[in-house]
Amino acid sequence: MDKPAPADHEIHHLIARRWSPRAFDPAGGVGATEMMRLFEAARWAPSAFNAQPWAYVYGLAGTPAFAILLACLVPFNQSWAQRAGALVVACNRTLDDKGAPLTHGEHDLGLSVATLLLQAEAMGLAAHAMSGFDRAQAAGALAVPAGWQPMTAIAVGLPGDPALLDERQREREVGPRQARRPVTEFAFEGAWPAAD
Amino acid sequence: MDKPAPADHEIHHLIARRWSPRAFDPAGGVGATEMMRLFEAARWAPSAFNAQPWAYVYGLAGTPAFAILLACLVPFNQSWAQRAGALVVACNRTLDDKGAPLTHGEHDLGLSVATLLLQAEAMGLAAHAMSGFDRAQAAGALAVPAGWQPMTAIAVGLPGDPALLDERQREREVGPRQARRPVTEFAFEGAWPAAD
């Protein structure tokens, strides 16, 4: 369903229209072609020193991989993400080739994930990023190597009927967008304002 | 200048066209209206538990704030970013209200920064995110409070003439896009492939 951001300043429609739904069409509609386009978008995000410290593990609905990914989610997220067309776990690199910590790995994965989410919006897909999953379980189940860590799970698929959701989720689905702090509270000219 | 990503799979033009130029038009062209639109886009990024762990400090060209921000950049970045219409330092929250570490602060700032960069592309602005700045200097100069940290600097402005750049920068500006790993090297179905 459409619920564009109630923006105070004009922004691009892809950015305004993207949100994080929980209602997916269990008929699927996401295949290898769609996944490649999502990851291609993720590929062209910027990163510090072009390190590209991102990797994605995914499973399409109906495959064993999907079941393994679904089992990593917290129960609340499993309850709705089970109807997604695909599940993804996004991982960031934590150590460089010499074993030194990468300072921008998590941040730059975020750059890549946001690009993927906006590509999904451009394709008419619903996409929902989650922190609610068991990172240690995912690291083991997905064979994430040393020097990398699971950071974000993503459900993606065709938008579905909110009637499929339980009551609490349905209320959030059809209700207004989650509020955001206004720009004046997080963007400052010159310096951070002094605390009250 | 235009140098769209040589994508292997079809992606939205905003994502394909975004890159990180160093040539800015020293005539400026970025004012409060443009900055508010950029931050509005950043505002509507997703974040874990809607924590919105992002803040931005900015300065417009020709103001004391710009000079303070410019001085935080490493000399290589100062050499070209001095012609930007505005400089920004993006900060992520590191501790929650109870003083506990935020696990997704850096990642979620990355979601917000990528959204800002794509909004800049939509507005025909050049934007270049940098890790090359002195984070401690920025924290002091911008009065970043405890529980937050400077993470990413961003130069934004009107696209400029590559002839303004020094020879090395000009060659990179007019040369091909920096390469990215192909999707098959960072997106895996089911599990990470075993190391060779």
Image (cartoon, coloured by chain):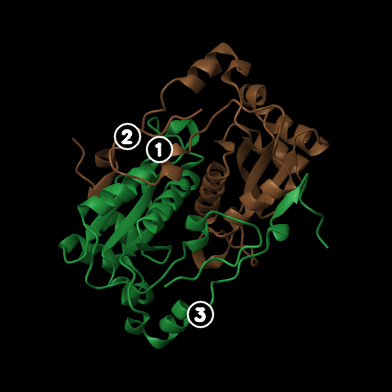
Chain colours: A green, B brown
Residue A34, given in percent of the width and then of the height, sits at 27, 53
Residue A71, given in percent of the width and then of the height, sits at 27, 68
**Which residue is labeled 2 in the image?**
B181
Discs 3/1, front: 3
Q: Kindly indicate the quadrant of the structure image that contains residue A183.
A: bottom right
The correct choice, above or below, for B178 with respect to A175 in the image is above
Residue A19, given in percent of the width and then of the height, sits at 47, 65
**Which residue is labeled 3 in the image?**
A175
Residue A5, given in percent of the width and then of the height, sits at 55, 66
Mark 3 belongs to chain: A
- Image quarter where the C terminus of chain B lies is top left
Q: Are marks 3 and 2 on the same chain?
A: no
**Which residue is labeled 1 in the image?**
A52
Residue drawn at the location 72% of the way across and 60% of the way down: A185
Q: Secondary structure at mark 1?
A: loop
The correct choice, above or below, for B157 with respect to A177 in the image is above
- Contact, mark 1 vs mark 2 (Cβ under 8 Å): yes
Q: Secondary structure at mark 3?
A: loop
